[in-house]
Image (cartoon, rainbow, N blue to C red):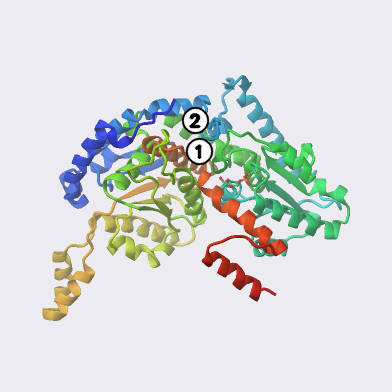
Amino acid sequence: MLHNDNPTAAKAWKKLEEHAKQLKSQHLRDLFKADPQRFQKFSFEVDGTLYDFSKNRITEETIKLLTELAEEMQVPAAIDSMVRGERINATEGRAVLHTALRNFTDEALIVEGEDVLKEVHDVQRQMKDFCDRLHSGEWTGYTGKKVKHVVNIGIGGSHLGPQMVTEALKKYQKPDIEVHFISNVDGTDAAEVLRKVDPETTLFIIASKTFTTKETIANAHTARRWFLETARDEAHVSKHFVALSTNTEAVSKFGIAPENTFHFWDWVGGRFSLWSAIGLSVACALGYERFEELLRGAEAMDKHLKTAPMHQNIPVLMALLSVWYTNFFGAQSHAVLPYDQYLRLLPDYLQQLQMESNGKSAMRNGKFVDYETQPVIWGAAGTNGQHSFFQLIHQGTMLIPSDFLAPVNSQNPIGEHHPMLLSNFFAQTEALMKGKTEAEVREELEKKGMSGVELEQLVPHKVFEGNKPSTSIMFDLLTPYALGSLIAMYEHKVFVQGVIWNVYSFDQWGVELGKQLAGTIEEELLHDKEADHDSSTAGLIQYYRQKRK
Ligand code: F6P
């Protein structure tokens, strides 16, 4: 069972409040000066990835108290409950077993009488066989031509993960297959992709856990109509449409045959599903072997989560630091800043993973929280972000903790580009941490010959407070294995945060209300019905009706 008490009642919470008061007056610059071993003390290498926590506003005492909080909130027992397959997603009555999707052990994992791993491995074999046939050219379109384009149609967890991974691992892309994504119900998304592909050589993957998501079903019907305009015969659909879903009945109603359906299970959360059949587009893009390397990277992180002590456990530390800044420093957002162009979609992916999971206000015991939960996640690839929003991180009024990520080696080592990129990566975290004091600014301006009123006016604008926390994450090269480990790390961070904030991380009731209302309004728009709305919504609908062509 998961712990369900208010975390603010924990003994460690009170101690952390006191400790935060003391630490707020200390500057990171001074903490570094006082301890030459700070980097060694707060950096950990796990599976070839270095996590440097030393530029965070922490001391050894902070880590001690935060891990006490994790113990009090029963994080180790919660991890155990998850990997054993208990129904920890209580509001939906489901287990949470994405770790089973990357478990390569031969042992059985019996959950409620079923060997979960056997079922997982059966679907993995089906995926491998499909990819092999696709890549060898044995699987052809209705005119006998090899498949050149794969279009994944899905949204949310059935889109963001596969798209981010496909983009991140572009360097490993199979040469003769191009993978595209359609997610938005805005017809422009489908139109722009369909413009680039050709019905004879295109395979559509309809990815939807529930197979009821309106956007995906609408896009799937559009793709099918578009295909049949050329192919003309329904019998050809089987060579061009496959489905990834837990809802076999709805898939077959749509007209996709069981042999073209890749199944997964309700114990796979949508935003945790890229390791399941939902990853088929990734496997099509890279080849199944590369997809398996991704899974193996995640499996290594799962082992780390289960075995590393709390104070050296990377996902646990990442979660605790987030709690530290959110609940004790009032931080309301967290930036994700990958210095790797291939990871440019990581912030988008992490937005769903983290905000859909822990953007909650009800505790597990049904009472409402009286403390903050999930901060806003945002970010963009470096160095681009430096020229748009970094100003605010450096000199704005909010405290914005950040994750900086970079590869030691580039997948595209052109000239001096990589050292230039990394110079910025190192420089930004150093600047955020150190800042620039008034004395330093004065000295600099005086050296330039400035003095008097002119100097006095400029000084405050050039002062950087510093003391802005960041975590640096460096991996050797962005391989499938390294990426798998990184994504799994963030997944576990989310879980541990949820345990501490005492929220259910694996449901998403908050997206339902908008869906319901959209359904009602769609009826009004399509069939000119009238319904009761507030004056703003009614006015907007009226405006649309008057202006539409
Ligand atoms: O946004 C709500 C949500 O249910 C997500 O959790 C999920 O990833 C997405 O919709 C897509 O759902 P499905 O895979 O069932 O189409």
What numbered label is drawn on residue 141?
A: none
Q: CA distance from mark 1 to mark 2?
A: 8 Å
Q: Which residue is disc 1 drawn over?
A: 506
- Seen at 68% across and 33% down, the residue is 123
Q: Is residue 80 above or below residue 527?
A: above
- Seen at 68% across and 42% down, the residue is 244
Disc 1 and disc 2 in contact, CB within 8 angstroms: yes
Mark 1 Cα-neighbour bin, 10 Å: few <14, some 14–19, many ≥20: many
Residue type, numbered disc 2: Ile
The C terminus: image quadrant: bottom right
The foreground one among 247 and 160 is: 247
Side of 453 where 273 appears, left or right: right
The foreground one among 226 and 441 is: 226
Side of 39 where 295 appears, left or right: right
Q: Is residue 148 above or below residue 449?
A: above
Mark 2 Cα-neighbour bin, 10 Å: few <14, some 14–19, many ≥20: many
- Seen at 44% across and 29% down, the residue is 79
The numbered mark, 1 or 2, whose residue comes first in the sequence reads: 2
- Seen at 20% across and 47% down, the residue is 32
Q: Which residue is disc 2 drawn over?
A: 88
The answer as to whether callout 1 falls within 8 Å of ligand 1 is no
Q: Is residue 177 above or below residue 13?
A: below
Tell me if I can see residue 252 in this picture: yes
